[in-house]
Amino acid sequence: MNLFHRTSSFVITLSLLCSSSVAVAEYLWPLPFGNELTSIFGDYRTRRYHLGIDMRTGGEIGKTVVAPADGYIMRVRTGYFGYGKVIYFKMTDGNTCVFAHLSAFAPKLEDYIQQRQIAAESYNQDIELSADKFPYKRGETIGFSGATGVGAPHLHFEYRTPDNVPVNPLTIKGFAVVDNSAPVFRNLRLVGFDNEELARAVGWDLSHAFRKSARSSEYTLSVTLPCGLDDFWLAAEIVDKVGKSLANKPIYDLEVRCLDRVLYHLRYDKVSFDDTYLIDAQRNFTMAQTGNQEYYNLVDLQTVRTMSGICELVGQDPPPIEIIATDAAGNSSKAIVRISDASHSSMDGKFAVPKPDTTRLNSLLDKYGQDYAAFEAAWIPGGRNLYLLVKAPSAKPAKVTALNLDAGFGEALNQIIGKFYLGIVDRMSDTASGGIVLETDSVHVLFEPAVGERASFAVPVAYQRIRHRSGTSLPLTSDDRRYTIEFPEGVNAMFPLEENYYFKVERSGIGRFANYSLLPSNSALTKQVSYTYALGDTIPKGIGLYSVGGKGLFYLGGTVDSVKKTMSAKSYVLATITARQDTIPPNVRQLRPAAGAVVTSARPKISFRFGDELSGVSDNIDVRIDGKWCIPVYDPESGEVTAEPHFDIAGGKHKLEIRVADKTGNVRRISTEFTRGKKKSR
């Protein structure tokens, strides 16, 4: 599917829609009670859309799930993670419904799947079925809601076209819900600056609140945004309530217009699985990382890559820009944004000229900088530019130049306010080659006041550029040479609004394994980066790479190259990385029946909890009674495993064997005995 369709020489409409054939007849709601939703199509997930709707089940497990139309079960999957127990139901019109996190299937199907699990001695199954194997009529029970996989009790439901593309169920007859609430505009943000901290420090006000008209569903800003002061795009915070849902939900349709021109169009109607990563371009990634996922970037990728900002797109002194937000029920709201030419702001006072904030500038120096005698200086990464901020000992004007002594030339730093000077210095290379790469270990800052003595000092270059002037990717390496990060080849490894070319690797921590942080770490990636760690002459058992976060360590993996003596892993996250050696198998506790226990049931329930303190548990779980495999059911959130033999056990002693493993291959084996006795007579 071609996501980008040019509608004029300046306008590109982004639509994740394709026209699809849907059934004319109304479907049956899958749960025979209520239709409250906890999540809808287009909700934000890490690097992907939520491609269905989540139906509330009142916190209960075992609610009846029925077939929305005549059809058959074409596929069944069972797994401990993700969707858990899931049904793919093919309807006679060719469309498919997906039911996930089920606690159980309909009885005949449940028996069939269990027999397949027993034969394979594996809980994890992915089975395709013929049309005549498990047919069901509209309204017949096909399964029961649950909490398998990940998440609280609920039913995850998807509607897919015959070519397996998810469609927004709220647009389909039978799956829509009553909704009378129009979307709400909250705030507008100016986005696309090299570094938002720096933008605020030099005087930009990036956030503006919408105000609602008392007479209509129209929203406006109390300010007129200036074109010509800098390049920026717009992002709008828009929220919506859907039916009985309490939490905010994504909108369905978003359009940005200027007179008869469509500047941007986004609709959450139909999304290919190949395009789900685009959510980090359509939602503002920076805001999403802080927990606010309702900011929509009002520009598409191709426009960002070919134009410098909204001002270039609309021209100076344009008519008002209209933003129209609509939900799946057709409720609509409109916001008006005015942008005008800022070039005559000094004449008529129409715009306030940005005034740098010395408090914010000092904060930048505290965060990024170092002291150099009477001066302070800081490298500040900003998209494709690398800035140098210098604080002089005096506010009197001076000529300040950053010199590349190796190349024999320099760049002037501009006095932005008082003692502060700022400039872009990444162009300091051989101009004959046309390069803009800063290729030197340090720059020499020359301070020449109008009155007084000159001063100079050297500032070590703290950041490395990940793109060579030839366009190839450059690896970033830590100061101890043990850790390397590589970005994928090509200029589109990052979304353009979050694109950074300059990074630095910081090493911290004590002990055997250091922590390696990449700064800045707030870029949204379109492709995975590669982390590599040098192991030395000996490859430790159970070695792996981990990301370091607020919840502790998260195992990324560890592919070992025995020739190069390195270990590597890939990730879509620019995280703090460390290496760890995991040699301890998972722990097992609360085993029932306990060693030496007496049970009376011919099919006693086996249960235990297990966990792992480092790499985490794998789905390699094995439970046996007298050597016969039992179906182990694992809840990843509680850590509990339950199993019940599919055969009767005789009276007397029986051997219980359990085997579990972690993600680096450490195995815990437990072998105990219990006795089946007779029930005591009263």
Image: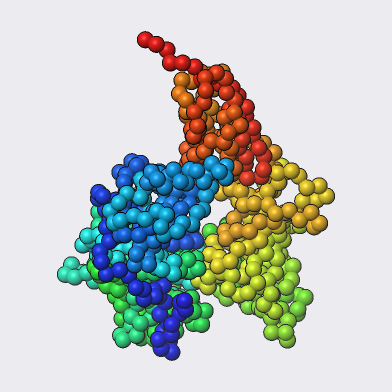
- Residue 659's quadrant in the figure? top right
Q: Residue at x 52, y 46 (%)?
A: 116
Q: Residue at x 25, y 64 (%)?
A: 26
Horizontal placement of 13 versus 630: left or right? left
Q: How many marks?
A: 0
Coordinates of residue 472 in the picture (x, y in percent): 69, 75
The answer to whether residue 518 shows anywhere in this view is yes
Is the residue 437 above or below the residue 521 in the image? below
Coordinates of residue 615 in the picture (x, y in percent): 62, 44
Specify the farthest residue to the bottom: 9
Coordinates of residue 373 in the picture (x, y in percent): 68, 60
The residue nearer to you, when weighing 558 against 493, is 558
Is the residue 223 above or below the residue 476 in the image? below
- Residue 122's quadrant in the figure? top right
The residue nearer to you, when weighing 38 against 305, is 38
Specify the farthest residue to the right: 537
Is the residue 73 above or below the residue 95 in the image? above
Horizontal placement of 483 versus 570: left or right? right
Horizontal placement of 514 versus 136: left or right? right
- Residue 410's quadrant in the figure? bottom right
Q: Residue at x 25, y 49 (%)?
A: 33
Q: Quadrant of the C terminus?
A: top left
Specify the farthest residue to the front: 132
The residue nearer to you, when weighing 664 against 306, is 664
Specify the farthest residue to the left: 215
Coordinates of residue 283 in the picture (x, y in percent): 43, 66
Instruction: Give the colour scheme shown.
Output: rainbow
Q: Residue at x 29, y 56 (%)?
A: 138
Is the residue 519 above or below the residue 593 in the image? below
The residue nearer to you, when weighing 235 against 410, is 235
